[in-house]
Image (cartoon, coloured by chain):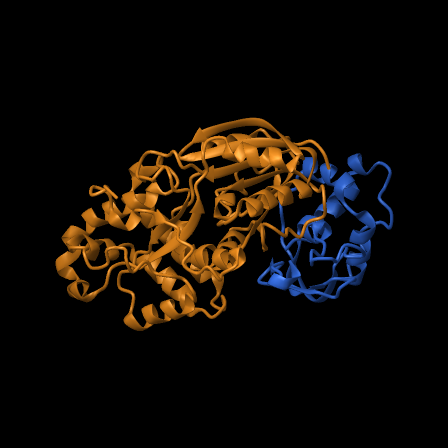
Chain colours: A blue, B orange
Amino acid sequence: MRLITHNMLQCHVKGCNANNFPLEFQEVELEQEEAEMNEDFLRNMLTKLEYDALVSTCLKLGINDLPATMPADAAYNDEFLQILHRVILETHVKSGKMICPNCKHIYNIRDGIPNMLLAEHEV
Amino acid sequence: MSTSKKNPLHIPSPFQAEEPGMTPEQKEQEYVHNVYQVIAPHFSATRYKPWPVVEEFLMNMPAGSVGADVGCGNGKYIGVNPSLFMIGSDRSSNLISICSERGHEAMVCDGLALPYRPQFFDFAISIAVIHHFITPERRINAIEEILRVVRVGAKVLIFVWALEQSGKRDFDKNVQDVFVPWAMPKKAEPKQSRDRTQSRAQGVRRNERSNVHQQPSTSLSSQSSSAAVTTAMTSLNEASSIDEPLDQLKMKSDQADKDQDQKVLTTHNLTFEEFASTRENAIQQTNVQNEQTQPSAKESEAAPVYNRYYHLFQKGELEELVVRTNKASIVQSGYDRDNWWCILEKTTS
């Protein structure tokens, strides 16, 4: 699971509608894997990202590369786009847990695959 | 059914609510999720050629668009247009493992409860998925859930199986809810692991009615099909909850892919389910020569058959569901390869 994916995930347990993002990582094993840079995609993501959540999540994982606030010229700031690419597209979570800050539901990640299935009563 | 020419293993039968006490969720678990979980490697090996309508839809997306493939199976559409970023999800962890092995972003989740932030995606596809939901309400909910996670203005492409199809399948035009059998090739599978297969496929009903006893020599040869597929199948079943290193599985299923490609080079234009039956024919021919070399073949049983539940859509039915969501308009719709398809655009959040 790439870090970009974490930024679009929220807890979807029935009735858990507030403070359900971002899910908190625990016991995470990371891996870097090179990927081709897609600038169109990165620019498109600038408006979609919850940037503050991305930065705080990264800091907890020991990734300090991102500036605290998104540069005003982000779309054409090559240096920033490169960092963003490395963080959201090349950083993979191989295993770990994601915990809902609200209802504390635990989603497991194994072999790089998050299991977001809920039990029947949670849907 | 008057389909004597057709392989009896591929004749659909009406879906009967045999267990009236079961909830729709339980029925889908038993007749959809459990089946895909078991047939995943074989199913995946028969799914590699993108359908043209889907391919065109993806190729027409602006570069850099972010999309969700809901019910992505082995992920065969995720890499079609490399300028896009797509995330796949599926109920079957075995299919998602294959998808992830191919380097695609993928997760296990339910189509009725997607874990994505609202309005996130620029587009979505859901190919041959919504026909597996058992009630009209659940089919609408599935469309609504996709619409929830795409932004206003986003396009969504949906494919569902058609009742009106004429081809390999003879569907009774009065019966929309059916079981469609999936015949699993099962050659050299050791007896003990076959038993294990059976016990792991909890709740999966093998279609015992399905001519197990009236299959003459063709059944013997049809079951002695691609060993590679069977091996992949066996090892998956033996791996307790996917503990086996997945690259082994990948290699096996890749080999199965190649085997199939070689055997059925001419099947590329075939439709959704035709591949499997044509494949069997090809294998039957291949195996005519092999039969003497397989003394155990006589003792084997018929290939295991797994019944999947389908709701077959009538003309206009998909569009009607879309309209009932009140959140999207229909941009384009059509019929292709035994499926009704529809491109919708989200109009309100």
**Is B63 situated left or right of A72 in this image?**
left
**Residue A39 in the image, given as x and y percentages of width and height:** 69, 37
Q: Is residue B112 visible?
A: yes
The residue depicted at 72 percent of the width and 45 percent of the height is: B118
Question: Is A54 left, or right, of A29 in this rendering?
Answer: right
Asked whether B40 or A31 is in front, the reply is: B40
**Picture quarter containing residue B253?**
bottom left
Provide residue A42's location: percent of width, then percent of height. Answer: 71, 40
Whether B261 is drawn above or below B54: the answer is: below
Residue situated furthest left in the rendering: B292
Residue at the farthest front position: B20
Residue A118 in percent (x, y) is at 62, 61
Would you place residue B51 above or below residue B276 in this image?
above
| Relative side of B282 to B143, left or right | left
Q: Which residue ends up furthest to the bottom in the rendered image?
A: B192
Residue in view at x 50 percent, y 68 percent: B241
Classify the position of the C terminus of chain B by image quarter: top right
Q: Quadrant of the N terminus of chain B?
A: top left
Q: Is residue B94 visible?
A: no
Q: Position of residue A34 (x, y in %)?
A: 63, 50
In this rendering, position of residue A11 left or right of residue B79: right
Residue situated in front as seen by the camera: B330 or A67: B330
